[in-house]
């Protein structure tokens, strides 16, 4: 009888070192978009580390406009995983098999995101991939990087069940006079700061069960070293109240 798999000597356990760390404007999980490429104004850096910090590893990578980043959900890893999760796309109260979702609470906390590669730099022996459209927490450890290959990776007629369509990014975003003055002060961080805030808030970062419901709570989110306060003024409209330096 032919054997396809030698189950008496299975290789079931692996140890990997991170090859890079991500620098991202997103300092906390709250308000990170739920997938990459929803917020194109989010710019980040993939900083190669250790033996992988060698420009030879990324020679010719700039031929590719987009990359797959395979990473560890380090921010939620300690919370473990569950066989059933409640995806935000189903309103946050219907349970689905974890492997049928992109939830962070998976048996192995591995994430994958396609991001845009803007450029590669090597300065003073430090190689950095400059990326945009990321959905990653600051400090995310990267375990692999691969080019995105459209002829194979993009299946335009694929069925995606409850996640077929991009979520409706319905909210309109208005900056108060105070927030506009604050923006002028902090714009040196990123000339696209206003666009970043607008794109993040358009996605409605509130928990899924609050979506489409009236809400007078003042929310705070952190981008870079800034704290941004905002509030819903109507079901489909957000007012940015103010922008301040984070205290920590
Ligand atoms: N594109 C990835 C991630 C989808 S889940 C994938 O499909 O595997 C997206 C959520 O991951 C974001 O909303 C953010 O809250 C969370 N996230 C991003 N980086 C993380 C990290 N390092 N640790 C824990 N959660 C993270």
Image: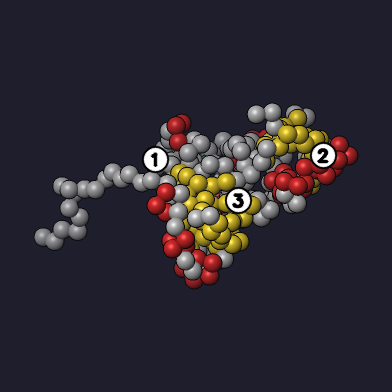
User: Which residue is at the far left?
Assistant: 1
Distance CA(mark 3)–CA(mark 1): 27 Å
SS assignment at label 2: helix
Residue 236: % across, % down: 78, 43
Q: Tell me the element at label 1.
A: loop
Q: CA distance from mark 3 to mark 2?
A: 23 Å
Q: Indicate which disc, 3 or 2, sits on the residue closer to the N terminus.
A: 3
Q: Which residue is mark 3?
A: 44
* Relative horizontal placement of residue 17, taking residue 85 as reference (left or right): left
Identified at 66% across, 55% down, the residue is 40
| Image point (77%, 36%), residue name | 243
Residue that carries the numbered disc 1 in the rendered image: 107
Q: How would you rate the neighbour count of disc 3 (Cα within 10 Å): few for under 14, some for 14-19, many for 20 or more? A: many
Residue drawn 51% across the image and 36% down it: 75
In this view of the protein, which residue sits in the foreground, 213 or 108? 108
Mark 1 vs mark 2, CA separation in Å: 43 Å
Q: Is residue 23 visible?
A: yes
């Amino acid at each position: 009888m032919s054997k396809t798999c030698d189950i008496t000597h299975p290789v079931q356990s692996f140890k990997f070192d991170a090859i890079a760390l991500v620098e991202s404007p997103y300092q906390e999980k709250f308000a990170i978009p739920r997938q990459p490429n929803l917020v194109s104004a989010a710019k980040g850096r993939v900083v190669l580390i250790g033996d992988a910090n060698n420009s030879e590893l990324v020679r010719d990578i700039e031929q590719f406009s987009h990359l797959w980043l395979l990473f560890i959900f380090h921010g939620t890893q300690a919370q473990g995983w569950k066989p059933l999760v409640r995806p935000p796309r189903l309103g946050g109260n219907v349970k689905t098999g974890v492997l049928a979702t992109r939830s962070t609470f998976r048996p192995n906390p591995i994430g994958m995101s396609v991001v845009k590669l803007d450029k590669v730099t090597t300065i003073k022996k430090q190689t950095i991939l400059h990326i945009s459209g990321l959905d990653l927490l600051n400090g995310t450890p990267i375990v692999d990087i691969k080019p995105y290959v459209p002829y194979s990776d993009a299946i335009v007629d694929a069925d995606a069940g409850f996640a077929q369509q991009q979520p409706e990014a319905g909210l309109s975003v208005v900056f108060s006079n105070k927030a506009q003055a604050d923006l002028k002060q902090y714009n040196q961080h990123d000339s696209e700061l206003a666009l970043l805030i607008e794109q993040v808030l358009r996605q409605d970062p509130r928990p899924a069960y609050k979506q489409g419901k009236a809400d007078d709570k003042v929310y705070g989110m952190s981008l870079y070293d800034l704290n941004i306060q905002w509030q819903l003024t109507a079901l489909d409209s957000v007012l940015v109240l103010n922008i301040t330096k984070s205290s920590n």
